[in-house]
Protein backbone atom coordinates (compact mmCIF):
# COMPACT_ATOMS: atom_id res chain seq x y z
CA UNK A 1 0.00 0.00 0.00
CA UNK A 2 2.83 2.41 0.81
CA UNK A 3 4.37 1.79 -2.60
CA UNK A 4 1.08 2.71 -4.31
CA UNK A 5 0.74 5.90 -2.25
CA UNK A 6 4.34 6.84 -3.01
CA UNK A 7 3.72 6.30 -6.74
CA UNK A 8 0.58 8.47 -6.64
CA UNK A 9 2.44 11.17 -4.73
CA UNK A 10 5.27 11.01 -7.25
CA UNK A 11 2.84 11.61 -10.12
CA UNK A 12 1.58 14.76 -8.42
CA UNK A 13 5.09 15.99 -7.65
CA UNK A 14 6.29 15.67 -11.23
CA UNK A 15 6.64 19.14 -12.70
CA UNK A 16 4.43 20.00 -15.64
CA UNK A 17 6.12 19.97 -19.02
CA UNK A 18 5.42 23.26 -20.77
CA UNK A 19 6.29 23.95 -24.40
CA UNK A 20 5.66 27.20 -26.29
CA UNK A 21 3.59 27.05 -29.47
CA UNK A 22 4.05 29.80 -32.06
CA UNK A 23 2.53 31.05 -35.27
CA UNK A 24 4.32 33.58 -37.43
CA UNK A 25 4.24 34.44 -41.10
CA UNK A 26 6.55 32.11 -42.99
CA UNK A 27 7.04 30.03 -39.83
CA UNK A 28 9.79 32.45 -38.75
CA UNK A 29 9.54 31.63 -35.05
CA UNK A 30 12.65 29.83 -33.91
CA UNK A 31 11.54 27.92 -30.82
CA UNK A 32 8.77 25.62 -29.70
CA UNK A 33 6.13 23.96 -31.82
CA UNK A 34 3.96 25.60 -34.45
CA UNK A 35 0.29 26.37 -33.84
CA UNK A 36 -0.47 24.55 -37.09
CA UNK A 37 0.66 21.29 -35.44
CA UNK A 38 -1.86 21.44 -32.57
CA UNK A 39 -4.38 19.35 -34.49
CA UNK A 40 -2.09 16.34 -33.93
CA UNK A 41 -3.00 16.29 -30.24
CA UNK A 42 -6.68 16.13 -31.18
CA UNK A 43 -6.10 13.42 -33.78
CA UNK A 44 -4.33 11.29 -31.17
CA UNK A 45 -7.16 11.60 -28.61
CA UNK A 46 -8.28 8.31 -27.13
CA UNK A 47 -10.77 9.47 -24.50
CA UNK A 48 -11.76 13.14 -24.61
CA UNK A 49 -11.32 16.49 -26.33
CA UNK A 50 -12.59 19.76 -24.88
CA UNK A 51 -12.21 22.87 -27.03
CA UNK A 52 -13.03 26.47 -26.30
CA UNK A 53 -12.72 29.29 -28.82
CA UNK A 54 -14.02 32.71 -29.71
CA UNK A 55 -13.98 32.14 -33.45
CA UNK A 56 -14.09 28.80 -35.28
CA UNK A 57 -13.64 28.76 -39.06
CA UNK A 58 -13.90 25.96 -41.58
CA UNK A 59 -10.41 26.88 -42.82
CA UNK A 60 -8.89 25.66 -39.55
CA UNK A 61 -7.11 22.31 -39.56
CA UNK A 62 -9.12 21.62 -36.41
CA UNK A 63 -12.40 21.67 -38.35
CA UNK A 64 -11.67 18.42 -40.22
CA UNK A 65 -9.87 16.83 -37.28
CA UNK A 66 -12.64 17.57 -34.77
CA UNK A 67 -15.24 16.28 -37.24
CA UNK A 68 -13.33 13.01 -37.52
CA UNK A 69 -12.67 12.65 -33.78
CA UNK A 70 -16.28 13.54 -32.86
CA UNK A 71 -17.40 10.59 -35.00
CA UNK A 72 -15.40 8.16 -32.85
CA UNK A 73 -17.74 6.66 -30.25
CA UNK A 74 -14.92 6.13 -27.73
CA UNK A 75 -13.97 9.85 -27.66
CA UNK A 76 -16.09 12.46 -25.89
CA UNK A 77 -15.91 15.85 -27.63
CA UNK A 78 -17.13 19.15 -26.12
CA UNK A 79 -16.86 22.45 -27.98
CA UNK A 80 -17.51 25.85 -26.35
CA UNK A 81 -18.13 28.81 -28.66
CA UNK A 82 -18.96 32.50 -28.53
CA UNK A 83 -22.57 33.06 -29.64
CA UNK A 84 -22.08 36.59 -30.95
CA UNK A 85 -18.93 35.74 -32.94
CA UNK A 86 -20.49 32.66 -34.53
CA UNK A 87 -24.16 33.53 -34.91
CA UNK A 88 -24.62 37.30 -35.30
CA UNK A 89 -23.31 37.76 -38.86
CA UNK A 90 -23.27 34.37 -40.57
CA UNK A 91 -20.80 33.94 -43.42
CA UNK A 92 -19.86 31.00 -45.61
CA UNK A 93 -16.36 30.79 -44.11
CA UNK A 94 -17.44 30.80 -40.46
CA UNK A 95 -19.96 28.26 -39.25
CA UNK A 96 -22.68 29.18 -36.80
CA UNK A 97 -22.97 27.25 -33.56
CA UNK A 98 -25.81 25.29 -35.17
CA UNK A 99 -23.62 24.53 -38.21
CA UNK A 100 -20.92 23.14 -35.91
CA UNK A 101 -23.43 20.98 -34.03
CA UNK A 102 -24.83 19.62 -37.32
CA UNK A 103 -21.38 18.97 -38.81
CA UNK A 104 -20.20 17.20 -35.65
CA UNK A 105 -23.21 15.27 -34.34
CA UNK A 106 -20.99 13.22 -32.04
CA UNK A 107 -19.84 16.37 -30.22
CA UNK A 108 -21.60 18.31 -27.50
CA UNK A 109 -21.54 21.91 -28.77
CA UNK A 110 -22.19 24.79 -26.37
CA UNK A 111 -22.68 28.52 -26.96
CA UNK A 112 -22.65 31.44 -24.56
CA UNK A 113 -25.88 32.90 -23.14
CA UNK A 114 -26.83 36.22 -21.58
CA UNK A 115 -25.81 36.81 -17.96
CA UNK A 116 -27.46 39.62 -16.00
CA UNK A 117 -28.65 41.30 -19.19
CA UNK A 118 -25.42 41.09 -21.21
CA UNK A 119 -24.27 38.50 -23.70
CA UNK A 120 -21.36 36.49 -22.29
CA UNK A 121 -18.28 36.50 -24.53
CA UNK A 122 -16.19 33.34 -24.76
CA UNK A 123 -12.56 34.38 -25.13
CA UNK A 124 -11.10 31.26 -23.48
CA UNK A 125 -9.01 29.58 -26.17
CA UNK A 126 -7.82 26.14 -25.24
CA UNK A 127 -7.88 22.47 -26.13
CA UNK A 128 -7.77 19.76 -23.45
CA UNK A 129 -6.98 16.24 -24.65
CA UNK A 130 -7.40 13.02 -22.67
CA UNK A 131 -7.37 14.90 -19.32
CA UNK A 132 -3.59 15.09 -19.80
CA UNK A 133 -2.63 17.76 -22.35
CA UNK A 134 -3.77 21.38 -22.22
CA UNK A 135 -3.09 23.78 -25.07
CA UNK A 136 -3.78 27.39 -24.08
CA UNK A 137 -3.34 29.92 -26.85
CA UNK A 138 -4.07 33.36 -28.20
CA UNK A 139 -5.11 31.83 -31.55
CA UNK A 140 -8.67 31.31 -32.68
CA UNK A 141 -9.48 28.23 -34.72
CA UNK A 142 -8.75 29.61 -38.20
CA UNK A 143 -6.22 29.16 -40.98
CA UNK A 144 -4.83 32.67 -40.49
CA UNK A 145 -4.33 32.00 -36.77
CA UNK A 146 -2.59 28.71 -37.59
CA UNK A 147 -0.34 30.04 -40.37
CA UNK A 148 -0.18 33.83 -40.80
CA UNK A 149 -0.72 35.74 -37.54
CA UNK A 150 1.78 36.16 -34.74
CA UNK A 151 0.26 33.92 -32.06
CA UNK A 152 1.60 32.41 -28.85
CA UNK A 153 0.35 29.49 -26.84
CA UNK A 154 1.56 26.88 -24.40
CA UNK A 155 1.21 23.11 -24.39
CA UNK A 156 1.02 21.99 -20.77
CA UNK A 157 1.45 18.28 -20.14
CA UNK A 158 -0.02 17.89 -16.67
CA UNK A 159 -3.16 15.97 -15.67
CA UNK A 160 -3.81 18.07 -12.56
CA UNK A 161 -3.78 21.39 -14.44
CA UNK A 162 -5.70 19.96 -17.40
CA UNK A 163 -8.40 18.46 -15.21
CA UNK A 164 -8.74 21.66 -13.17
CA UNK A 165 -9.51 23.58 -16.39
CA UNK A 166 -11.97 20.88 -17.47
CA UNK A 167 -13.74 21.04 -14.11
CA UNK A 168 -13.93 24.84 -14.20
CA UNK A 169 -15.55 24.77 -17.65
CA UNK A 170 -18.01 22.15 -16.44
CA UNK A 171 -18.93 24.37 -13.49
CA UNK A 172 -19.39 27.42 -15.76
CA UNK A 173 -21.46 25.45 -18.25
CA UNK A 174 -24.74 25.50 -16.31
CA UNK A 175 -24.90 29.28 -15.96
CA UNK A 176 -23.02 30.67 -18.96
CA UNK A 177 -23.59 28.21 -21.81
CA UNK A 178 -26.42 26.35 -23.49
CA UNK A 179 -26.17 23.18 -25.50
CA UNK A 180 -26.79 23.59 -29.21
CA UNK A 181 -29.12 21.00 -30.69
Image (cartoon, rainbow, N blue to C red):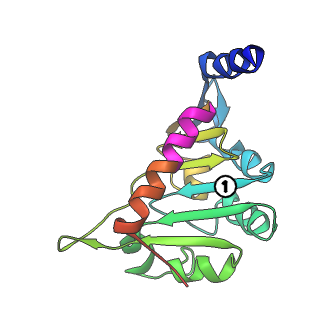
Instruction: Name the residue: 77% across, 14% down.
Output: 3
Question: What is the crowding at mark 1: few (fewer than 14 residues within 10 Å), some, or many (at least 20)?
Answer: many
Question: How far from the left and from the top, in percent, is residue 23?
Answer: 58, 39
Q: Which residue is mark 1?
A: 49
Residue, far left: 117
Residue at position x 57%, y 67% in the image: 57
The correct choice, above or below, for 125 with respect to 133 in the image is below
Q: Main secondary structure of the magenta part?
A: helix
* Viewer-nearest residue: 150 or 81: 81
Answer whether residue 160 is magenta in the image.
yes
Q: Which residue is more in the foreground, 10 or 37?
A: 10
Left or right: residue 56 versus residue 176 is: right
In the rendered view, tell whether residue 123 sits above or below residue 118. above
Give the image location of residue 143, x and y in percent.
61, 57
Which portion, as a residue range, is magenta? 158-166
User: Quick one: SS at disc 1?
Assistant: strand
Q: Nearer the viewer, residue 28 or 173?
A: 173
Instruction: Write the residue at 17% across / 74% down.
Output: 117
Magenta run includes residue 38: no
Amino acid sequence: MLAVLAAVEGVHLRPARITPVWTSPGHLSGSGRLTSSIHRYVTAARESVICSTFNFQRSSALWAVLSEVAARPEVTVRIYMDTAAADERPAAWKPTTTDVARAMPGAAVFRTVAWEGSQVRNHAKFIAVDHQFLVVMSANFSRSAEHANVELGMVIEDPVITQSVEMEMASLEAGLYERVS
